[in-house]
Amino acid sequence: MEKVQQNPHEHIRQQIQVLARYAGMDLREGASLAEEEKSKSAEMQTKLDSISTELGDEFIDGMQPLFDTRKARCFDSSWNWVRQEAYELIQQAIASCAAGSANPPVCVDEAALQRLKNRSSPGLPQMLAGSLSILQAANDDSLEPVIKLLLELHDVCAQSLTRPPVCRELSAPTGPHVNFELDFGPDGTMTYSEVPRPDEPSFVDFGEHMRQPTAPDMPPLIHFKKQSGGSAWSYYAELSTMYYEGLSKISGSGLSFSGQTALVTGCGRGSIGADIVSGLLSGGAKVIATTSSYSRKTTLFFEDMYRTHGARGSELIVVPFNQGSTGDIKQLVDYIYSNPGVDKGLGWDLDYVFPFAAISDIGSLATNLGSHSEFVQRVLFTNVVRLLGSIKDAKERLGYETQPSLVVLPLSPNHGNFGGDRLYVIGWTRGTGLMSGNNLVAQDIERLGVRTFSTREMAFSILGLLYFGIRDIAYCQPILADLNGGFGAIEDIGNVVSKARMSIQRKSSTLQVIARETSLEYAAMVPRGHSKTGATTDERPLAKHKHYFPAPRHYNQLQHLRHLQDMVNLDKVVVVSGYGEVSLYGNAETRWKMEAYGEFSLEGCIELAWIMGLIKHFNGTLKTTGATYVGWVDAKTEEPIGDVEVKPHYEEYILAHTGIRLIEPEIAHGYDPNKCPFLREIQIEHNMEPFEATADEAATFKAQNGSNVDIWENTSGGSWSVKFLKGALIRVPIALQVDRLVAALVPTGWSPAIYSIPDDVIKQVDQVTCYALVATVEALVSSGITGPYELYQYFHVSQVGNATGSVLGGTQFIQDMLKSRFLDKGLKNDVLQET
């Protein structure tokens, strides 16, 4: 039997070979290509393995590109934020007067006034004039201090329109302070804080102290050096004096950067670069800031920075960027210098470059330099030079050869002798990512005569380098600014820091022992379960959920509306007493918190966590402990969670799944922008295999397709066969990727069942109907109406009505009625009424 089967197979194979030779086809072509690709793949894998072994995974992963022009965020609406700040100042002054304050505010602090002056636009004096006329028409003597304040602000802001914005440092310098707290807790704790320096109430005093010599025949704490005798650098008194003038100007009348542009890398939260960006923006500069951790949290940080410091004419561009990537450097420079119209670039020419991006390298020695150390060297040295070279090439290409950029390169007097910096550090600046681990010893180091700096102080010192006299000299030759505060004069700094750290650890250990003894003594004297204050130890603070209703105004506060008396029929005036909504941030109150303040309150996080099904309320016995518990529990684990724990535990998830965001198919009725379904009509080129159908279905196929379909009744009876013939048209589903990827979606996990709407109602009605039910109840509650029948205590039933505006109506049921009917899917009998 096998021989019988083999002969036909061999015959067929021979026929195929004959036909292939006749057609000029190589039956081995596919196999040969596969073998060739396999060989190339093996060779490529060998090269990749060699590169991975040579450079290491950290180096390869670290140089992956991040730059994307589509993610660039632009902040330039200083005119808007200044109006908001001015309005807040006015309202605070009015509230103070209304509260009967004995000394109502008649002025604003100097920093706030400077922000108003820097951001003043033609619309601001007009807004202030309008507010002034309203308050004057009120004829309220208690508002007189507010009117005086408005007159002052109006004049100041109007005069500022003809003056450029300036960077003025009006805060107070701070110093390091370590607290050893002895408490009745389980151990002693060390608390680091920044405290005002008694001898430096302002940055004017800071500048004066920095220009004083540390000792006879010694240069000041911060000064300039010049190169003489080859490579030696020595104290440069003349340039140092000019530099101190620049510092005095920034802390005095201010320094303007209007019309200038800057690139700042390494300007994340708590960095020197962030304070530099703030200073440049307050002076009116246009700044492009890069971040290697691009996220919503990061963009909100920069948005808040611009909201506070952005001056008239300033602009802040935030882009994702990896300084370890050569591709990112090229794309970044191209984006900065490209034509804004054709190439969608910025069309800038950089005046200043601050390559401050830094990575720590802990424990690297000559004997154990690894992949991470090489990557750090690439970020801090190689690619800084590459970045400057790319900027130079762009300038030459565009003919900007007479417009040099001033580059501020951070150097180090430490050279990796201590801390986690090994290859890099920006002086001793407290609180930065590289030096924060050394904050505890900064106070002891200052006792040696060294000055440590806060990020604000270091940024102030660096911005002084942009003083026009120094800038002009730097255009002609490199200059060295020694801003280390005497740090470089300490010998064997690593040993000094180690001794200071060991001293702190000994003090902490002693306090921990004392604290434990105190705790044991207290436990023997105080009843179990109580703390020192007498409160039970398991009590935790609770959230304060409250509806905030506007306070009614006194009749005397409405005098400015007296001219409307007898002109308005109060019986026909619409009064909005409450509001409710189902929206992208849950409801009206949570949405207002996010839009007004940029973050959710503790109460807002709890409400959204409940709405999204992350937590649920529990009243009973816990399965895990058997204890009686009333409060919130995690919806999945059913573990208790306190009110104050909800925000830190769930906020990141809540922010990622609320608001305008990437479309989530699971809550968009299956709609996926990456696989958007369409039907494409095609014409078949040969007869298809028959398929089975009912008699009615076969008739419908024949009625639509005519001679392109053949139908017949099967011999078995009860069913028919349908065969599409050559030339028939059929529609085949395809999936296309569309470019609309974001939408305003309700919070992920939102369900009407959470609001106790019965399941049979949820299954019967459209989702929009559920939205209307929830929003209506919330509107009643926000009006103070907890039961709708309460209305009938005050109004006759004939005087109570309701009106609903549904816009499109039930969108899901509309889709079912149109699309599902077209696709011959099942429909509910009452689908029409829900549309």
Image (cartoon, helix red, strand yellow):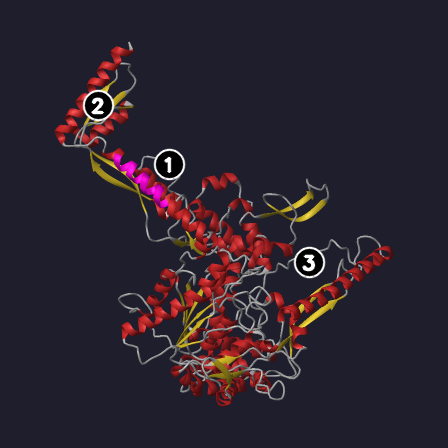
- Helix, strand, or loop for circle 1? loop
Q: Are marks 3 and 2 in contact (CB under 8 Å)?
A: no
Position of 600 relative to 828 (above/below)? below
Question: Which sits earlier in the primary sequence, circle 3 or circle 2?
Answer: 3
- Pointer 2: what residue? 711
- How packed mark 2 is, by other alpha carbons closer than 10 Å (few <14, some 14-19, many 20 or more), is many
**For this rendering, which residue is in front, 424 or 433?**
424
**For this rendering, which residue is in front, 509 or 816?**
509
- For badge 1, the amino acid type reads Leu
Q: Are marks 3 and 1 in contact (CB under 8 Å)?
A: no
Q: Which residues, given as a range, are shown in magenta?
A: 32-44
Measure the alpha-carbon separation of dots 3 and 1: 51 Å
In the image, residue 39 lies in the stretch drawn in magenta: yes
Position of 402 relative to 428 (above/below)? below
Residue 509 image-quadrant placement: bottom right
- For badge 3, the amino acid type reads Pro
Q: Are marks 2 and 1 in contact (CB under 8 Å)?
A: no
Q: Residue 231, percent across and down?
A: 46, 79
Q: Main secondary structure of the magenta part?
A: helix
Q: Quadrant of the C terminus?
A: top left
- Pointer 3: what residue? 541
In the image, is 185 to the left or to the right of 35?
right
**For this rendering, which residue is in front, 492 or 732?**
492
- Pointer 1: what residue? 827
Q: Residue at x 43, y 63 (%)?
A: 323
